[in-house]
Image (tube, grey):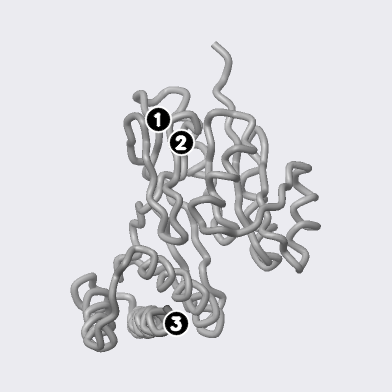
Amino acid sequence: MSRAKISAVIIARNEEHNIRECLETVRWADEIVVVDNFSTDMTQAISREFTDKIFQHEFHGFGQLRNDAVTHASYDWVFSLDADERASPELADEIRQAIENGPPADGYFIPRRSHFLGRWIRHCGWYPDYRQLQLFRKSRMRYHDEVIHEGFDLNGQARYLNSDVLHYPFRDIDHYVAKQDRYSDLMARRMAEQGRRFSPHQLITHPLGAFLKMYVQRAGFLDGMPGLILSGLYAYYTVMKYAKLWELSKKG
């Protein structure tokens, strides 16, 4: 029986600070596919050092972009990464073992370990982060067409791997604020499209609840000062998304 082949699929936009490190960690894949959202920095040039399979797509939401990216994969097994993620060597070995010798499955959840302000965040609800299937058969899986925090449908069985995807989402606090400004726009739009209504208490109770959930309930205090800052910043993000929901309701 021939060995199962894997397509590593990466989505990116203006990721010149991350893309090289990401692509270095998936050289073991049978092909590398980069779907770029019309970057204006060196993302495309750096990607060409690793693959000639680089495709341009407009952004109409993360769900659609991920589905578009998967269509470019030549092989049924897809390992999906964002440009700010890395595949550890242990994960590469475990992926091969899982799809070739492990119990039958059509998709795998992979724990994601995230780095922020100089340390790996082990609490705050950030680890292990199993939100998405990152390894799957493309013939059995499809992302929901949602603008952000997209779900998925898997026609088959999912299992869990043990080795980590390493995640470097924010270079510093300024980068966090800039990135979450965009995400709060997308979340407000999603809530508006879902028909959710704004209420003034959301600007107080929801941010406070978000902070207490991350810092107390999910033990963010064990992550030291980075855990405190992260919990506070997430409360700020929560204020922003509801403020923007209010703004959208006034425009409507």
| Tag 2 near tag 1, CB within 8 Å | yes
Q: Nearer the viewer, residue 50 or 93?
A: 50
State the residue at coordinates (67%, 48%).
Answer: 34
Quote the CA–CA distance across marks 1 and 3: 44 Å
Q: What secondary structure is marked by label 2?
A: strand
The furthest residue to the front: 252
Image quarter in which the C terminus is found:
bottom left
Quote the CA–CA distance across marks 2 and 1: 6 Å
Find residue 106 and name its label: 1
Q: Amino acid at mark 1?
A: Asp
Mark 2 nearby-residue class (10 Å; few <14, some 14–19, many ≥20)? many
Q: Amino acid at mark 3?
A: Lys
**Figure check: 131 above or below 250:** above
**Figure check: 174 above or below 59:** below
Q: Earlier in the sequence, mark 3 or mark 2?
A: 2
Q: Read off the residue under disc 3.
A: 251
Asked whether, in this view, residue 59 is left or right of residue 238, the answer is right
Q: Nearer the viewer, residue 180 or 126?
A: 180
Q: What secondary structure is marked by label 3?
A: helix
Image quarter in which the N terminus is found:
top right
Q: Read off the residue under disc 2.
A: 136
Image spot of residue 199 (x, y percent): 25, 83
